[in-house]
Image: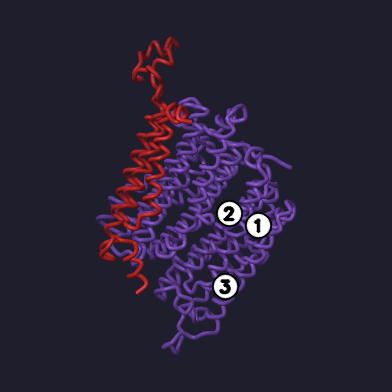
Amino acid sequence: MTQNLFIYAIMAPLLAALPVNLMARSYRPWAGTVAVGALIFSAVTSTVVLADVLKNGTIRYTLGNWPVPFGMELIVDPLGAMMLVVVSVCALFAISSAIRSASDEMPGQEHLFFTLALIMITGLMGLVVSADAFNIYVLLEITAITCYGLIAMGRGRAPLASFNYVIMGTIGACFYLLGIGYLYILTGSLNMPDIAGIIPGLDAPAAVATSFAFLMVGLWIKMGFFPLHGWLPNAYTYAPSATSVLMAPLMTKVSVFLMIRVMFFLYTPEYAFDHPDVQQLIIWAAALAIVVASSFALAQTEFKKMLAYVVVAEVGYMVGGVWLANSTGLTGAILHIVNDALMTLVMFLAASAVIYKVGASRFSDFAGLYRKMPITMAAFTLGAFALIGVPPTCGFFSKWYLILGGIEAGQFSYVAALVVSSLVNAVIFFRIIEIAFFQKPEGEDVLRRAEAPLPILAPLVVGAIALIVVGLFSGQIVGGLIAPALPWSF
Amino acid sequence: MLEEIVAKYNYWIYVVLMMIGFYAMIGKRNMVKKLLGMNIFQTTIILFFISTGVKRDAGIPIVDKYAGLAGELEVAAVMNPLPHVLMLTAIVVGVSVTGVALAVLTRVYREYGTLEEDEILEKIGR
């Protein structure tokens, strides 16, 4: 029974999407309730699946019982199960906050938002367990297409940002598809473990290298890796806050996870790190990504846009960590996927709460917020500490692994970039904290407490507590989950 | 050189078409032209996949089920149907992306009254 439990976790949002759209036409408040219910089910089931996978080992499931390599296979290994939990929990928090913020920002269209969001979550959960290379392309496009719609629901420049994302996202997906095409011509298979078994015996180095390059560049565009990040900041800034809360923690992180999958499960680590020049180039690109994105973040005066640039910098952390080619760096990168999902979730939830109450999220709108919204700002402060990397928040531990990995690999440009980025984050966030703590908003003499409503506040508080809990338990996460799952050891 | 091009002409066609699409997506300032470039780009990949399934003098892949199960089927006599099946999915994806993009473009037009990128940037800057 537990063998196919994870299918229910993935299917629940998809099955809920249809009734949400149909029922909510007659009575709109149902939309949010049904969506949250489906995601609670998903989150609980995913946690059970994670416990089961850790106890009984990897689950391999062939859809429709077609034998591998002809049928589509789903593989739930410990990392995949961990990602299932991350995706479903983050999605639950984001959708919960959307109950209020969606009706605030997209009145009359909530059911459309929830329908698209649920389909997107199904796509993301499918991505982390799929072991079929072509299936991953289809799921990537499912998440991307729903995302285009979700972004375009925003006001003002949102449709323009969405269109830029359509163009860039399609280039990324097409590159991925081309890479798969080359691999299919070479191996005649689409099953990832099957292809991985065939590649070492191939005598076509140029074609394999081309496919690898196409797959990597395609995924880098999808995750917004510098210098392919052009679409990301505007898309995250102008999207409705419910959309950015959902997208920012999940889209880039799942893409990074897919990159790890492709590098180590489709190809071998030996193949991926065969050319030291290429590896060096990518680490430099990652270091540059961190520095440039951090300085762009420093130049912003709007909270959401600044966060979007912080996300770009964090993508640089993770890509660099993976390409350090040692187990410490890879551990740091995988741990950072979890931590960064939580940190961006908390920060965008805080942005959502501020936008709900104050109406906008320019830095000047934060004036006096420590008195007005103390709980929100406490969670915001925790999130800021995590992004800066203050112990015992989770951000510190993954950054520590990444720095250790960088020193181990002798990549001091990358280590320096990490340190610079932490300092820049400190400057940025203390600037906001200062405004929120000391400045008074104009025109208001008496500051009354006015917190955001419970559906936004509850996930924010739970997420902020999780930042510390995950931080305190990072030893267990690394020892129990990540270390056994590493594809090789040096 | 020429022989190489002629022998693998399907790949050359795909590369040339793809570059045309890519140029339209990156170089054109009109958003509908960008969208058309995106369509060319996607269609090229479909052509590329389909051409990989072709075999010389092979027939259509409709075969006698019992002969196939008995292993009497001559593989070289039928085309590879899998790329076609994959591309069916890719066509559906392409159509959906185009549909969403057109819907987004109508919203952009309503917002700015134009689909020229230069004019939109001018209006945003104002």
For discs 2 and 3, the disc positioned in front in the rendered view? 3
| Closer to us: A465 or A310 | A310
- Crowding near pointer 2: few (<14 within 10 Å), some, many (20+)? many
From the viewer's perspective, tell me whether residue A173 is left or right of residue B112.
Answer: right
Q: Secondary structure at mark 3?
A: helix
Callouts 2 and 1 close, C-beta under 8 Å: yes
Please state which amino acid type lies under the numbered disc 2. Answer: Val
The answer to whether A55 is drawn above or below residue B56 in the figure is: below
Q: Chain of mark 1?
A: A
Q: CA distance from mark 2 to mark 1?
A: 9 Å
Q: Which chain is tinted red?
A: B
> Disc count in the image?
3
Q: From this viewpoint, which residue is outermost toward the front?
A: B2
Q: Residue at x 34, y 60 (%)?
A: A159
Residue beneath disc 1: A398
Coloration mode: by chain
Q: Earlier in the sequence, mark 2 or mark 1?
A: 2
Q: Residue at x 67, y 50 (%)?
A: A324
Q: Earlier in the sequence, mark 3 or mark 1?
A: 1
Is residue A20 visible in the rendered image? The answer is no
Q: Residue at x 32, y 47 (%)?
A: A18
Residue beneath disc 2: A338
Q: Chain of mark 3?
A: A
From the viewer's perspective, tell me whether residue B22 is left or right of residue A204.
Answer: left
Residue beneath disc 3: A428
Please state which amino acid type lies under the numbered disc 3. Answer: Ile
| Closer to us: A410 or B21 | B21
Q: Colour of chain A?
A: purple
